[in-house]
Amino acid sequence: MDRNLVYPGAIPLDTDILSLNRNAMVAFGFLAQACLGTNTVVDGLACTPTSPASSAVQIGPGSISQLNVVDSSAYGSLAADTSDALVKMGINLTAQTITGLVAPTSSGQSIAYLIEATLSETDVDPLVLAYYNAADPSQPYSGPNGSNVAQNTLRKQSVQLQVKAGAPATTGSQALPPVDNGWVGLYSITVGYGQLAVTSTNIAVLPLAPFINFKLPQLRPGFASGVQAFNTPGEFTFTVPDGVTQVEAEVWGAGSGSFASVSGMPSGGAGGGGYARGRVTSLTAGALIGVVVGAGGSGGTGSTNPTTGGSSSFGTISATGGGLNPQANTSSPQNGAPGGLGVGGDFNAGGSAGQAGISNVGGLGGAAPLGGTQNSGTAGNSGIFPGGGASGAGTGADGNQANPGASGAHGCVIVRW
């Protein structure tokens, strides 16, 4: 930021003050550009019905930040600067009333009004100023050279608002007029035949209106500033938080269940779920992303077979559940079940397969990545979360028992931003 130099005893110049104001405006303009970019941004300027309701609306206090030039005309003694681009902010400190929202005159018709805004920069507040009179310093001139001419004393930057009427048409087919060049559309207001007052239901924010939807305290830049975990089976929706444009998701598929053992042969361990991790970019606040958490497979008994682990997903990033292995029989032990796979992530990994049953002992349950294997027991043991496969069932010390299998662990989805 440029700063003026002044010295003790030096005669002050009008450009000292003018340059100070311009330098401060330039500095704040580039700060606004660093935070908001160069696209037009609007804050505040809420549109509400009047009280009592009438054929007018009020636009509340607010601001508009818009790319412009430093000065389109001379600023006091400083020359115009139209070659340098600058983000400027116009501010309205008080509410403004928009009138003229009249209803159409034909039954069955409605009319759509557009409220648009732009940055306005005007020189205002004219005063007849006192000037130094070298011939008689005790009697200052009124106006330059005693001309008694009033001069503007403020270059005001504000939000200029205007309303444009569309063409009346059959209700439901009325069209909004186009936004003027250099302006931005903020609201549409629909008024029907015979309507004497505008209500809140007639006012709608335009989809492309450049309102700031979040404030700095709500911003969470980078990763590990926010986290949401989905640990229970089912279908869910993740809503992109304000100020977030990318997230990272970790996805685990669920573990499968294990078979029951049969007399003389233990069952193998169940497969662990797959794993995928990846970033999802180019998001907008409020966007909805589908989330699925797979359920752990059920354990087998003597009369029922186990089930595979369910797949989990976050958008296009997914991980399949652990698979099933052949059932043991009296002549051959059961091998371990295969693990699931990760798909669509920046990093994809498979779950480990279950261990085959050995002697009288059931096989170890396979692990999902970052999870653990499950130790075997006489009956099968449930898989370890997240996504672990169940251990196989043993046949007891005498080798003649038939014991049930166990269920796999549920999958999981963790989202970080």
Image: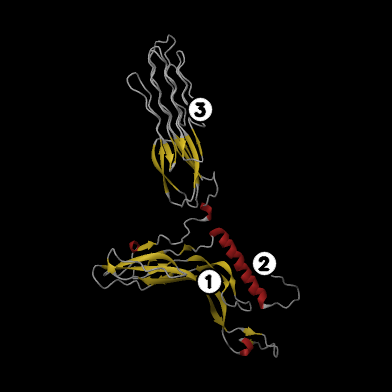
Q: How far apart are marks 3 and 1 (CA)?
A: 64 Å
Per the model, the C-alpha gap separating discs 2 and 3 is 62 Å
Image position of 47 with respect to 341: above or below: below
| 9 sits to left or right of 355 | right
| Sequence-first disc among 3 and 1 | 1
* Disc 3, SS: loop
Viewer-nearest of labels 2 and 1?
Answer: 2
Count of numbered circles in the view:
3
The disc label shown at residue 46, or none: none
Mark nearest the camera among 2 and 3 is 3
Name the residue nearer the viewer: 90 or 52: 90
In this view, the residue in front, 228 or 277, is: 277
Residue matched to label 3: 372
The coloring applied to the image is secondary structure
Tell me if residue 57 can be seen. Answer: yes
The picture places residue 333, in percent across and down from the top left corner, at 42, 16
**Quarter placement of the N terminus:** bottom right
**Residue 391 drawn at (x, y percent):** 45, 22
The answer to whether 347 is drawn above or below residue 365 in the figure is below
The amino acid pointed to by label 1 is Gln
Which callout, 2 or 1, points at the residue further toward the start of the chain? Answer: 2
The vertical placement of 403 against 85, above or below, is: above
Label 2 and label 1: CA atoms lie apart by 21 Å
Q: Which amino acid does label 3 sit on?
A: Gly
| Residue at disc 2, secondary structure | loop
Sooner in the amino-acid sequence: mark 2 or mark 3: 2
Mark 2, residue position: 2
